[in-house]
Every structure is written in structure tokens, then in C-alpha cells.
Amino acid sequence: MKKILSGVLFAFLLTIIPFVKVNAASITVHNQDELKNALADSNIDTIVLGSDIETTEKINILRPVTIDGNGKTMRYVGTFGKENSKDNTVWGGIYVLQVYKTTATIKNIKLTGGNAGLLINGSKVNLVGTIDVSGNGFGGIELGQGSDVTETPELKFEEGSKVVNTTETEDRPTIWVPDDTDNAIIEIDGVRNNIESGEYVTLYDIASMTPVENPQTGDSIYLYITLLFMSLGTMLFSVKKLKFNNQN
């Protein structure tokens, strides 16, 4: 009797196992099709680049996910505009990656060859490690909204992260907010910086947003500046008080 029950249970398990959904938390991809398929699978929360990837279209991120570039490159090799130009300074609205109305983490990757490397479209994006946005026609990262998007775009630099852009120029900034966007947020070391409509942000600006620490104590230089002004204020008050007492 026990053998019969065991056989029935085994047969039952065989019938339901194919319908059990396995949570594939991480996957490694090697080309555009594999990347798009992984982005379409909501069970996958981390996508790792196993090799450099060439794309012929803008890659959209529409759900929470981590893109771990693993030090690899995503390069757009398609065309731009109605003229089907191969020149990425011809505007075609081509971003190597677009994060649309969601959250995402972008890690250790180079995004190049597009009109821009990354569009944060009404989304919140965390940058981890080194993000290289060199070699794009109009700049590195756009913090935008566009039509039918009301959410404020936010870019957060995780501890130790940095942006590289060897092709930054006056009219090809590393980060910018377009005119059709009210404002955006860049967060560095817990400090939220408001970036206004039409504003360009250079690598120098990003460095200026980063608090400088005292190498001996690890304290932010802002702390010492605040203490300095407090000390000066106390000294000035003491001098005024002394003069007042002398006059009386």
C-alpha cells in the first residue's frame, strides 16, 4: 500500500513541477537579444554583461532592475534621424539606455555611440562603480521628463561611484536637464542637489557637489567650515561686547 501511495505522489509531483516558476534572480547576457529578453522577464532582478554588446536600437528599462556592466561596453551602432545617418551628432532621440518611470541600478559599464549614453526619464537611478559615458553625440546623461511624465528624475551616486566622460565639451555636457523638464535631483553622499530646467552639469560641477573629507578623521570639510564660521562669529561677538564694556 505504501509503495502504491509513493508512486502516486511521485507521479503527482512530476505533473506540477513543470508549472513551478523558478526565480532566476541573475542572468548573464552576451548580445542585444539576450539583453532584451532578460529585461522582459520580471523574475530577473540582475542582468550581468558577459561581453561587450552592440545595439541597433534604444534599450528601454521599464521595471526595477540592476544592470551590472561587469566592466563591459554597450555600444549603439545603428542610425540616427530620418536620414539614417551614422553620425551620432544628428539627433534621433537615441539613448544607449533609457530608464522610463521606474527605478534601476547601473553598475560598472560604458555606454557609448548614441546621442546620449543614458536617459533617466522620470525615474530614480543609482550609479555604482564607474560609469563611462564618453563618445556620445550630445552628452552623457539626460535627466528628463518629456511628454506624459510628471515624476522628477533622480540620479544617486552610491559611495565610491564616479562618472567618466573623456569627450565632455561646453555643448556636450556630462549631465543635463532639458528645457521641457521642471527640475531634477542629483544626490551625492546624502546631499540632494536640485538641478534646474536647462542646466548643464560638468565633471567639475559633480566634483564640487562631493564633500571633501579630512583624511585623518574622515570628517566632512563642511563640518570644519561650519565650525570656523561659528568661531569667527563668537570672536566678533566677544570683541563687540568688550568694546561696549570699555565704553561704559
Image (spheres, rainbow, N blue to C red):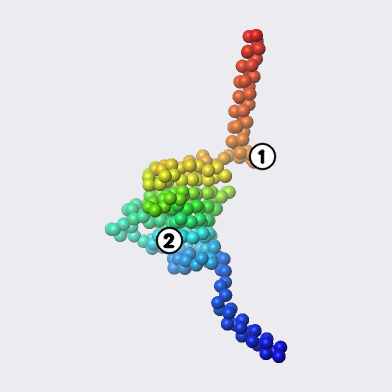
Q: Residue at x 42, y 63 (%)?
A: 54
Q: Position of residue 43 (x, y in %)?
A: 53, 67
The residue closer to the viewer here, 241 or 130, is 241
| Residue 27 in sight in this render | no
Image-quadrant location for residue 241: top right
* Quadrant of the drawing holding the N terminus: bottom right
Nearer the viewer's eye, disc 2 or disc 1?
Answer: 2
Q: Position of residue 147 (x, y in %)?
A: 37, 52
Q: Residue at x 37, y 45 (%)?
A: 179
Q: In the displayed orientation, state which residue is furthest to the top.
A: 248
Circle 2/circle 1 CB separation < 8 Å: no
Q: Which mark is residue 59?
A: 2
Left or right: 246 in relation to 65: right
The residue closer to the viewer here, 128 or 148, is 148
Q: Which residue is mark 1?
A: 217
Q: Position of residue 68 (x, y in %)?
A: 53, 59
Q: Which mark is residue 54?
A: none
- Rounded to the nearest angstrom, the CA distance separating label 2 from label 1 is 44 Å
Q: What type is the residue that disc 1 sits on?
A: Thr
The residue closer to the viewer here, 196 or 221, is 196
Q: Earlier in the sequence, mark 2 or mark 1?
A: 2
Q: Residue at x 39, y 43 (%)?
A: 198
| Residue 94 in sight in this render | yes
Image-quadrant location for residue 87: bottom left
Q: What type is the residue that disc 2 sits on?
A: Ile
Disc 2: CA contacts within 10 A as few (<14), some (14-19) or many (>=20) = some
Q: Position of residue 63 (x, y in %)?
A: 49, 60
